[in-house]
Amino acid sequence: MIGGPRNLHPEPRRADHRTEKAVRGMQALTQCWFTRVHRPERARHRAGDGALTSACRYCQRPLISWDHETWNLANGLDMSRLTELTSGRTLTLIDMVDDLIVRRFAIRDLYDEAAVEAFKQDLRRQYGLDNPASTLVLRDSAPPLRKRRARPHAGDTAPGPG
């Protein structure tokens, strides 16, 4: 043989302690890594500008929400929020499966809320949003309207009979 005899059955190598330590320190991939959807922890905080902040319950990264529905990573540039601030109120058509913005509709020319609702209904028909198999969602950049019940004042009494 050229170069000497070869060992056809080498001894198994003992594991390196550094490798074992690195493997023990590795974290498993979290659910949000696969789904690209971050879910906030129960504890949420209101920022001075009206946004909600929290941490992702899976990866513990900081999150921010402007519409109290969708949560985005807080440590980067949020192009959707930047668009809302610079171009006024918009309707955004989002494909939830592909996590893709399909189209934005500027509605700053529609001054009446009834006209905005009519435009939303037209978009729902045009893009088939009411179809149960649809993966598209229409989001409004306006803050959500909250219906609050009027609380009686301390001195007010309920009207009695008669």
Image: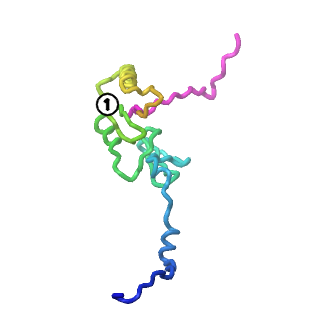
Which residue, as the protein is rendered here, is positioned at the far bottom?
4
**In the rendered structure, does residue 7 fall within the stretch colored magenta?**
no
Q: What residue is disc 1 on? A: 105
> Which quadrant of the rendered structure holds the N terminus?
bottom left
Q: Which residues are magenta?
A: 137-162
The relative height of residue 112 versus residue 95 in the rendered view (above or below) is above
Please provide percent x and percent y for residue 100.
36, 40
**In the rendered structure, does residue 151 fall within the stretch colored magenta?**
yes
Please provide percent x and percent y for residue 76.
36, 52
Residue type (three-letter) at the residue carrying disc 1: Phe
**In the image, 32: left or right of 94?**
right
> Which quadrant of the rendered structure holds the C terminus?
top right
Residue at horizontal 47 percent and vertical 50 percent from the top: 32
Please provide percent x and percent y for residue 30.
49, 54
Please provide percent x and percent y for residue 97.
42, 40
> Which of the 4 image quarters holds residue 83?
top left
Residue at horizontal 43 percent and vertical 34 percent from the top: 135
**In the image, 96: left or right of 151?**
left
Residue at horizontal 36 percent and vertical 31 percent from the top: 91
Between residue 129 and residue 47, name the one nearer to us. 129
Which residue, as the protein is rendered here, is positioned at the far top?
162
The relative height of residue 43 versus residue 116 in the rendered view (above or below) is below
Residue at horizontal 38 percent and vertical 89 percent from the top: 4
Q: Can the viewer see residue 95 in this picture?
A: yes
Count the marks: 1
> Which of the 4 image quarters holds residue 140?
top left
**What type of secondary structure mainly makes up the magenta span?**
loop
> Which of the 4 image quarters holds residue 160?
top right
Q: Can the viewer see residue 113 in this picture?
A: no
